[in-house]
Image (cartoon, helix red, strand yellow):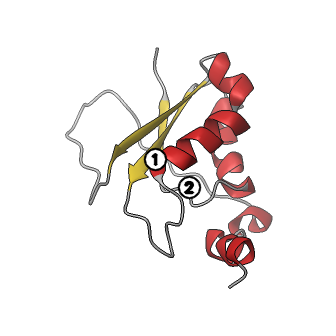
Amino acid sequence: MKYSLFIGRWQPWHEGHRWLIDQRLNEGFNVCIAIRDVEKSDSNPFSPTEIKKNLERELHDLVSLKKVKVIIMPDIESINYGRGVGYDIIEHFPPEKVKKISATEIRKKIFNK
């Protein structure tokens, strides 16, 4: 089974993230959400395990149908590929309403900073 891969910190998961994966789900593709294994900090207040549990709870129906898979991956410094690798690289352009969503602002509200 093939998946469209989305890599991020997801700190925290929000409507903009959901909009992003819905672009592929709505086209009939499966989605793999890869959580970068980053150290906890002010910018990363949740552990990868906490994020994974939250996403699997939020997306329970899609996970149970195997439309969405959530994994933890090592932190990365780049994404590299060779020619003819058998997959596409696709950029999605969110509408202004979604583009304005800020995980930094959401974290401030969560932690009252």
Compared with 50, 112 (above or below) is below
| Residue at the spot 72% in from the left edge and 31% down from the top edge | 26
| Residue at the spot 72% in from the left edge and 70% down from the top edge | 110
Q: Position of residue 71 (x, y in %)?
A: 45, 35
Q: Nearer the viewer, residue 26 or 38?
A: 38
What whole-number distance in Å separates the C-alpha atoms at marks 1 and 2?
7 Å
Q: Is label 1 in contact with label 2 (beta carbons under 8 Å)? A: yes
Q: Residues within 10 Å of mark 1 (few under 14, many from 20)?
A: many
Circle 2 residue? 10
Circle 1 residue? 35
Q: Nearer the viewer, residue 20 or 33?
A: 33
| Residue at the spot 65% in from the left edge and 52% down from the top edge | 17
Q: Amino acid at mark 1?
A: Ile
Q: Position of residue 5 (x, y in %)?
A: 46, 37
Compared with 35, 101 (above or below) is below
Left or right for 39, reference 51? left
Compared with 15, 73 (above or below) is above
Left or right for 37, reference 11? left
| Residue at the spot 68% in from the left edge and 58% down from the top edge | 94
Farthest right residue? 97
